[in-house]
Image (cartoon, rainbow, N blue to C red):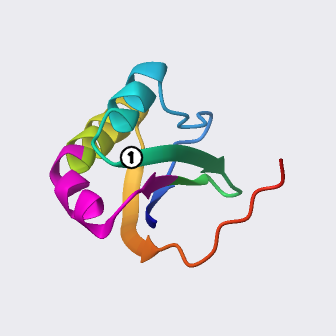
Amino acid sequence: MFARVSTYKTSPGTTGEPAEETVRRVLELPGCRGLYYLKGKDDKSLSITLWDTQEDVVASQEPAGRIRSETSREQNMQIVEVEEFEVLTEHLKQ
């Protein structure tokens, strides 16, 4: 499994939480396994998308980038960084 982590600076007074339509569009991308959105301190937030294969991550770069840019404009957020990782372990308590 692979992950893409995007870091954002949100505008004061907004969470930057993605709209349901945005979530739907991301989850419909081939190989996407899920999406997390995290709101931190100091107007910082992260989105984490999970992907089946590295090929899925590569194939999703352009459409995910469009979605990220559109959402950032709509939410008045700045994209600070986008990184990709291989997930080495996965442990979720049921």
Disc 1 marks which residue? 32
Residue at 32% across, 44% down = 68
Identify the element where label 1 is drawn.
strand
In the depicted view, which residue is nearer to us: 82 or 43? 82
In the image: residue 66, left or right of residue 5: left
Q: Amino acid at mark 1?
A: Cys
Residue extending furthest toward the top: 21
- How would you classify the magenta stretch by its main secondary structure? helix
In the depicted view, which residue is nearer to us: 91 or 26? 91
Residue extending furthest toward the right: 93
Residue 5, horizontal then vertical, whole percent: 46, 63
In the image: residue 55, left or right of residue 44: left
Vertical position of residue 32 compared to residue 74: above or below: below
Residue at 69% across, 55% down = 40
Q: Write down the region rendered in magenta.
A: 48-63
Crowding near the residue tagged with mark 1, few <14, some 14–19, many ≥20 C-alpha atoms within 10 Å: many
Residue 65, horizontal then vertical, whole percent: 24, 50
Residue 3, horizontal then vertical, whole percent: 45, 64
Residue at 19% across, 44% down = 63
